[in-house]
Image (cartoon, rainbow, N blue to C red):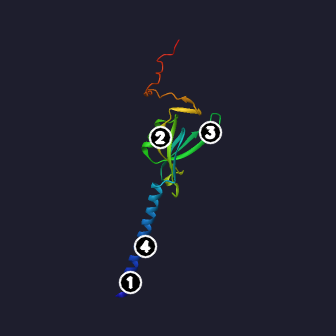
Amino acid sequence: MTAYDQRGIGKLRVLIGLLVIAALVAGYFWAATKWSYASGERAGWVQKLSRKGWVCKTWEGEMAMVSMPGAATEKFAFTVWDDSAVEQINKLMGRRVNIHYEQKVGLPTSCFGETRYYVTQVTLVEEIQLAPGVVVPTLPAPGAPTAPGAPAAPATPPK
């Protein structure tokens, strides 16, 4: 009878061990998705946004950044998890935007995204700074409200 009881206790220990390992793995994934190594902002023109993946579908994008006029374009690849951020990017595609991102490290596999940079927010950049004190205002989108105090665009070109 004691041999039978010890076999049951051994199975219980194995089951508890497996549950502890599963909890540790789940805790690791939770911490890796919630904690960010770094966060920041970048400005440029989003030139690509697509949903990719065979099994795990993620939104992958690419932004062209120019630091100074005439300089080579740098590309910034990013991943988007949030559907509202995807909608914002699609609305502002082709216009200069500022994106806020979080860099996450330690996420295994590409099921979480192809990059380490996860976009959380997108805002429109109203003016482009060429040099300190020199800015070029961008044209508002058709039908968009203008900034207070800004001159209204003429309805017809002057003759």
Residue placed under numbered mark 1 in the picture: 6
Could you tell which of marks 4 and 1 lies nearer the N-terminus? 1
Q: Nearer the viewer, mark 1 or mark 3?
A: 3
Disc 3/disc 4 C-alpha distance (Å): 53 Å
Q: Is the Cβ of the residue at disc 4 closer than 8 Å to that at disc 2?
A: no
From the top left corner, tell me how far across and down residue 23 is, in percent: 42, 66
| SS of the residue under disc 4 | helix
From the top left corner, tell me how far across and down residue 75 is, in percent: 59, 42
Could you tell which of marks 4 and 2 lies nearer the N-terminus? 4
* Vertical arrangement, residue 129 with respect to residue 14, above or below: above
Please give the name of the residue rendered at 50% of the width and 35% of the height, measured from the top-left corner: 125
Disc 1/disc 3 C-alpha distance (Å): 69 Å
Q: Nearer the viewer, mark 2 or mark 1?
A: 2
Q: Is residue 92 visible?
A: yes
* Vertical arrangement, residue 11 with respect to residue 63, above or below: below
Could you tell which of marks 2 and 1 lies nearer the N-terminus? 1
| SS of the residue under disc 3 | loop
Say few, some or many: other residues with alpha carbon within 10 Å of mark 2 (under 14 / 14 to 19 / 20 or more): many
| SS of the residue under disc 1 | helix
Tally of marks? 4
* Vertical arrangement, residue 118 with respect to residue 124, above or below: below
Residue 17's disc is: 4
Disc 4/disc 1 C-alpha distance (Å): 16 Å
Residue placed under numbered mark 2 in the picture: 122
Residue placed under numbered mark 3 in the picture: 73
Q: Is the Cβ of the residue at disc 3 closer than 8 Å to that at disc 2?
A: no
| SS of the residue under disc 2 | strand
Please give the name of the residue rendered at 51% of the width and 39% of the height, measured from the top-left corner: 98
Q: Is the Cβ of the residue at disc 4 closer than 8 Å to that at disc 1?
A: no
Disc 4/disc 2 C-alpha distance (Å): 44 Å
Name which residue type carries label 4: Gly
Q: Residue furthest front?
A: 133
